[in-house]
Amino acid sequence: MPMVELRNVSKTYPGGVQAVDRLSVSLGTGEILSLLGPSGCGKTTVLRMIAGFEWPDEGSIAIGGRPVAGGGVRVEPERRGVGMVFQDYPLFPYRTVGQNVAFGLHKLPKKQAMARALDVLELVGLKGYDRRYPHELSGGQQQRVALAQALAPEPNVILLDEPFSNLDASLRQEVRLQVREILKKAGATGILVTHDQKEAFTVGDIVAVMSKGRIEQIGSPYELYARPRTRFVAQFLGHCALLEGTVQQGAPGVLTDLGLVPCNHCPASNGERVTVSLRPDSLMVDPEGPLKGAVESIAHEGHSLELTVKIPCGAHFVRARALASPELAVKPGDNLRFSIAPDRVAVIS
């Protein structure tokens, strides 16, 4: 039985703005889903409908097998068994960390509520911090207190609304790894809303890329990055050069203006028109490679160089990016040869 299930859910705001359009998604117990997309794609509206802060115009929502919205059912937020972690952590400055975490446990006796709070603080790596106040904590620690606060009542689902947006860039990677680890230790089912690909891929077992109120593609981080099904998904998940071409199964590859682009994974039939996506890791600097391009710019990534290159393509040029060793002696204007890694070419049919 799915822990969270949305069936053909739609939501239109006053003025005719359709935020969510017949969206369906199912999430199993203990799974973490990342809803990823640009601003205005409807991902926050989906989260708010699951929480009960918004009501769908059409479709149904069930949590833990129990209908909570749609078909005449209207279960209020406090009765859905859902915990929320917001962009701004709702911590009371005049309460201790322990008191903040125990705040939502008012139905329990005071001693029992504090014991539960201490258990959850240990789970999030903040054992011994219960007597401190929020202003005495770092941003990352405050974020973990907010997560502990959401976990304390043992909800069916944890909803995270852009929870890392207020953290310094240097802290984000560390904290999102910690959040994933905490959710997994707790056995929690989680849904993260974000516009950041790295956050979505780091935290989520499953990622759903949204556009204009619909899910463009859903799958593992690897599936979305390596096997995008639409041009939107390919472009949203990082820089790529898109080429039109015809499938040549005998080669195997796709015949484009750039020549034959080899690929090991092609979902299309021989002779079918498709789009080829080349990411920076698709192109390799190779003195014997068939492609020749002029280096336009160089970005130092520490562990590698990312080269922007201009490659002749029929009567025009293709701008692509390629990864190279940081030890490569290269400067803008240099001409290099490249080969294509066939296992890193995506074909969109």
Image (cartoon, rainbow, N blue to C red):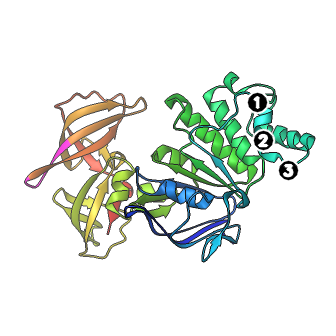
Q: Nearer the viewer, residue 71 or 64?
A: 71
Q: Which residue is mark 2?
A: 103
Q: Which residue is mark 1?
A: 95
Q: Which residue is mark 3?
A: 107
Question: Which residue is at a point 25% across and 39% down the rendered structure image?
Answer: 308
* Residue 292 in the image, given as x and y percentages of width and height: 18, 44
Give the quarter of the figure containing the N terminus: bottom right
* Residue 300 in the image, given as x and y percentages of width and height: 35, 29
Element under label 1? Answer: loop
Q: Please say if 30 is above or below 132.
A: below
Q: CA distance from mark 2 to mark 1?
A: 9 Å
Q: Residues within 10 Å of mark 3 (few under 14, many from 20)?
A: few
Q: Residues within 10 Å of mark 1 (few under 14, many from 20)?
A: some
Q: Amino acid at mark 2?
A: Phe
* Residue 223 in the image, given as x and y percentages of width and height: 47, 59
Is there CB contact under 8 Å for labels 3 and 2?
no
